[in-house]
Amino acid sequence: MIYLDSPIGVGFSFSVNQSFYYLVNDEMTGHYAPQLAQLILQTKTTKINLKGIAIGNPLLEFNKDFDSSADFLWSHGQIQDSTFELLKTQAAEEKIDVCVEHETVTYMNRKEVHNALNAKLVGITHWSTCSSVLVYNFQNLEIPTISILGTLVKSGVRVLVFSGDQDSVIPFMGTRSLIKGLAKDLGLNTTQAYRAWFRGKQVAGWTQVYGNILTFATIRGAGHAAPFYQPGRSLQLFKTFLEGKPLPNRH
């Protein structure tokens, strides 16, 4: 197992054998993991024997992933019909008056708010939602990585894409649609029809497999960081994937 720490300078890991390697990432790193896997395959001098990749609640295609949020929120009764129609027809965030990042920053830097919270700015002069110590290229998030998964599959790398079924940030509906489209583009037939998978006697999620190499799975009751919400079911998913076995049916 490789633990990849970021930024450079934290953590350490090494290997002394020729075992297979898997990349397993969740949330935003699910966007970068396919790019790392592709780099490993493209680097001819590498000795990393990449066997598979598993990514959770990943950002695969910017517009498709975030556009599905409206469907998720409406289907869960969290927004009214008029808001849903506005999101689907206008697709413009500025049409909705919400408390977004800039307004939050302004509010949290008001002196009266500091006093009410008994808060002190220690070592900094300004409160912000995210540290700027590291410079991130946020435009990279808009680069589709779904096609990179196709490249990995063509190279014989097993791919598992999993989603918490309660994630409203990157809902499973968009991810499921993208994986289905990828399988069609690759000419992969369904080798395991959409079905429930189990942990013990409980339904742990649902899954579908294409060509015995591309798997989509949901984790029931999990949010955006699936292992945080459902550690047991997530462990079952990872363990089964590493063993190269189908996700368990009812015992």
Image (cartoon, rainbow, N blue to C red):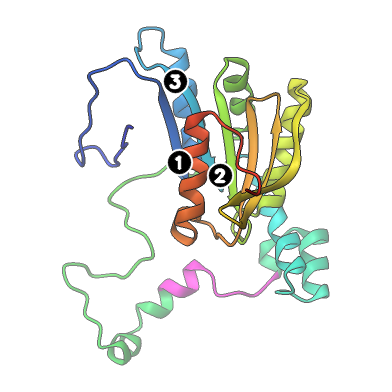
The label on residue 75 is: none
Where 70 falls versus 180 (above or below)?
below
User: Where are the magenta residues, as a range?
Assistant: 96-105
The label on residue 50 is: 3
N-terminal of the two: label 1 or label 3? 1
Q: Residue at the spot x=74%, y=74% of the render?
A: 77
Residue 64 visible in the picture: no
Amino acid type indicated by mark 1:
Asn
Residue 43 visible in the picture: yes
Where 225 falls versus 62 (above or below)?
below
Q: Secondary structure at mark 2?
A: loop
The label on residue 25 is: 1
Q: Residue at the spot x=21%, y=80% of the render?
A: 120
Q: Residue at the spot x=61%, y=42% of the render?
A: 248
Q: Position of residue 67 (x, y in %)?
A: 71, 53
Which residue lies most toward the top here?
44
Q: Are marks 2 and 3 in contact (CB under 8 Å)?
A: no
Whether residue 196 sits left or right of residue 10 in the image: it is right
Whether residue 17 sits left or right of residue 75 in the image: it is left
Separation of marks 1 and 3 at Cα, in angstroms: 14 Å
N-terminal of the two: label 2 or label 1? 1
Which residue lies most toward the front here?
251
Separation of marks 2 and 1 at Cα, in angstroms: 8 Å
Determine if the magenta segment contains residue 30: no
Place residue 166 in its image quadrant: bottom right
Q: Residues within 10 Å of mark 3 (few under 14, many from 20)?
A: some
The label on residue 58 is: 2
Q: Position of residue 127 (x, y in %)?
A: 31, 70
Amino acid type indicated by mark 2:
Pro
Separation of marks 2 and 3 at Cα, in angstroms: 19 Å
Q: Residue at the spot x=59%, y=62% of the render?
A: 221
